[in-house]
Amino acid sequence: MARIKFCGAAGEVTGSKHLIMTGKGNLLLDCGLFQGKRAEAREKNLKFPFDISAIDAVALSHAHIDHTGALPLLTKNGYKKPVYCSSITSHLSEIMLKDSARLQENDAEFFNKINKDEKIAPLYTEEDALKAISLLRKKDSPFKPFENMKVSLYEAGHVLGSCQIFAETEGVKILYSGDVGRQSQLLLNPPCFPSETDYLVIESTYGDREHPEVEDAKEVLAEIINSAFKKKSKVIIPGFSLERTQEIIYILDNLKNEGSIPAIPVYVDSPMSCEITKIFNEMKFTGNFSKSFLEYARLDKDPFGYEYINYISEKRDSQKLNDAAGPMLIISASGMCEGGRILHHLRNSIENENDILLLVGFQAQGTLGRRLKEGEKEVKIFGLKHEVFMEVRSLEFFSAHAGKSDLVSYVRKVNPKKGIFLVHGENSQREGLSQALKKEGFNDIRLPEHGQEYEL
């Protein structure tokens, strides 16, 4: 008899970990890092709610750190077995895990440098990340992680390389959606709909609301850039290195070609974003991208703006931006303002009322991005208090996650026969999606809590 245990992202949006337990082996679906306030995040990330020695395999849905970022902690605690994922996810995870380790080491070093009374250590080092990377196994076709388990991967349409994980074991078929992409999006193909599912484990990030049409983002972004150009403002965009940064660049390229914005300097200040955008550029004519993007790329030849966007990898070039005068647009990681170079840019601009923080992605509870979005007037950056005078704006157009109606449509097409588990969402979002699904006739819907187990 198979069981499932929810070990992360149950009533929360980050830190995805779900454990399928069978008589022949145990499969961990994702191994994500929890992102939030430093003390809470540290405690949650260091404590695994399962016996690591009992894990026989890990399967990854995609490369985002909230789905992969705890792998180095797993290996640091003795895990040495395979980590399965798509070929593209393997490539991207190698980049992102190395970067995650470097960011943690650099942030800890800087925090300790400017704080006399409190010292912190990185959760893991680059050496730990390399151990995790060595366990990655590329699997684009069905595979058997152990004797009584068959796993297939299906397109999720969330980010490049993202997959839904379909597990068949002990007479039941379990579909883990990972993060589900929108039906209409800028860059990628939409998700597919695996059928013959008994149990569905589905994300609910936007389960209680819809997205505005992403096509309308161009007009609003143009208005912000034109205003910033006149006022000589710095526009600072916390960008998720995988997908969101490339979407913003793609829209900027559209606006530039249309003549809708002036020649404002644009900087992509994130080594990881630079590497990942290069991968997008190299793969732009593959089958992973939408028809509309392919048509644009064939005409434009440079949809990611290499001829005019400044891609910054070196630390010294990043530091120069602190003293440079606006107008300029800086896209930097991380997307929830929880680490990386974005914190240095915020620290430099947050008390300048002429500058703009432009949030373009989901901000989880407890993150600095969420606190700024909700209007807090004093925040801590690297442990030091700062008053917030810069303008904070949020564009809700962008999301690699399906909205409420797309999620309901997805469930309707998958049509799970025995039950639905709602994960990767705050409780209000899970409740909203649950109510919508009940109206569609789905009644066996569960909202698991952290550590809760169910028999399948």
Image (cartoon, helix red, strand yellow):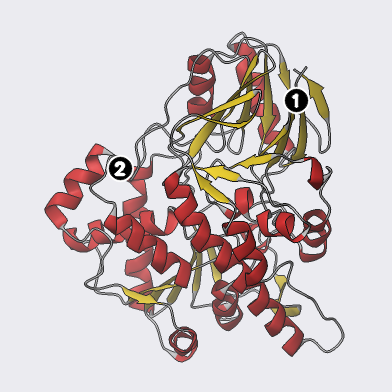
Which element type, helix, strand or loop, lies under badge 1?
loop
At 48% from the left and 48% from the top, the residue drawn is 89
The crowding category of the residue bearing disc 2, from other C-alpha atoms within 10 Å (few below 14, some 14 to 19, many at least 20), is many
State the image coordinates of residue 339 (x, y, percent, origin top left).
63, 69
The disc at residue 298 is none
At 66% from the left and 34% from the top, the residue drawn is 429
Residue type for callout 1: Thr
Which element type, helix, strand or loop, lies under badge 2?
loop
Direction from residue 244 to residue 171 in the image, left or right = right
Direction from residue 153 to residue 203 in the image, left or right = right
Q: Quadrant of the C terminus?
A: top right
Q: Is residue 96 above or below residue 346?
A: above
Q: Is residue 250 above or below residue 271?
A: above
> Which residue is most to the left?
299
Rendering quarter of residue 200: top right
At 37% from the left and 54% from the top, the residue drawn is 247
State the image coordinates of residue 370 (x, y, percent, origin top left).
65, 57
Residue type for callout 2: Phe
The disc at residue 289 is 2
Residue placed under numbered mark 1 in the picture: 22
Q: Disc 1 versus disc 2: distance between alpha carbons?
A: 37 Å
Q: Nearer the viewer, residue 327 or 404?
A: 404
Q: Quadrant of the N terminus?
A: top right
Q: Is residue 403 visible?
A: no
Which numbered mark, 1 or 2, is in the foreground of this view? Answer: 1
Q: Nearer the viewer, residue 347 or 187?
A: 187
Direction from residue 406 to residue 282 in the image, left or right = left
Q: Nearer the viewer, residue 358 or 38?
A: 38
Q: Is residue 424 visible?
A: yes
Direction from residue 428 to residue 194 in the image, left or right = left
Q: Nearer the viewer, residue 116 or 233?
A: 116
The crowding category of the residue bearing disc 1, from other C-alpha atoms within 10 Å (few below 14, some 14 to 19, many at least 20), is some
